[in-house]
């Protein structure tokens, strides 16, 4: 194995101008209807150039392994974050 950086490079080379692109690690578990949720989040951003990113939660206490349903709405907090700016220029700042 040559590692995750090389694998991401290969994935990037497959990009052919698709409207959406997504990258995840092989060990990621997805909840039911994750695709509907992420499209809704993108629409909520009201910015066609929005980039959605997260630090993933563990499966334990977050996903019902029998149904695939989400059991928690929480996300890990990695740093101090806050919104700044006004109107269309409002954005999330990480500190």
Image (cartoon, rainbow, N blue to C red):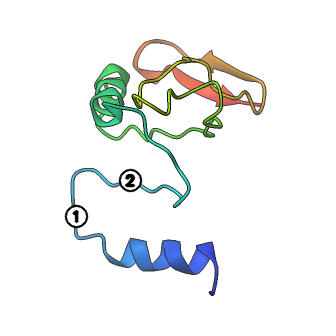
Residue that protrudes farthest toward the top in the picture? 87
Query: Is 87 placed left or right of 75 in the picture?
Result: left
Q: Which residue is drawn at 44% across and 31% down?
A: 66
Q: Which image quarter is the N terminus in? A: bottom right
Query: Is 85 placed left or right of 19 in the picture?
Result: right
Q: How far apart are marks 2 and 1 (CA)?
A: 13 Å
Task: Determine which residue is flagged by label 1.
Answer: 17
Tell me: residue 72, above or below residue 48.
Answer: above
Which is nearer the N-term, disc 2 or disc 1?
Answer: 1
Position in image of residue 51 (x %, y %) = 44, 41
Q: What secondary structure is found at the residue carrying circle 1?
A: loop
Position in image of residue 72 (x %, y %) = 56, 18
Query: Is 41 placed left or right of 86 in the picture?
Result: left
Q: Nearer the viewer, mark 2 or mark 1?
A: 2
Q: What secondary structure is found at the residue carrying circle 2?
A: loop
Tell me: residue 89, above or below residue 59.
Answer: above
- Assess whether mark 1 and mark 2 are in contact (beta carbons under 8 angstroms): no
Position in image of residue 68 (x %, y %) = 41, 31
Position in image of residue 25 (x %, y %) = 54, 58
In depth, the one of 55 and 51 nearer the eye is: 55
Q: In the rendered picture of this protein, how many numbered marks are placed on residues?
A: 2
Q: Residues within 10 Å of mark 1 (few under 14, many from 20)?
A: few
Q: Which residue is drawn at 56% across and 56% down?
A: 27
Task: Determine which residue is flagged by label 2.
Answer: 22
């Amino acid at each position: 194995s040559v590692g995750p950086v090389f694998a991401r490079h290969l994935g990037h080379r497959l990009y052919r101008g698709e409207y959406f692109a997504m990258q995840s690690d092989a060990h990621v578990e997805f909840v039911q209807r994750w695709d509907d949720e992420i499209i809704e989040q993108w629409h909520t951003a009201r910015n066609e150039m929005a980039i959605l990113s997260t630090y993933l939660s563990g499966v334990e206490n977050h996903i019902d392994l029998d149904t695939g349903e989400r059991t928690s709405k929480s996300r890990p907090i990695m740093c101090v974050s806050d919104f700044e700016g006004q109107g269309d220029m409002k954005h999330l700042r990480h500190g």
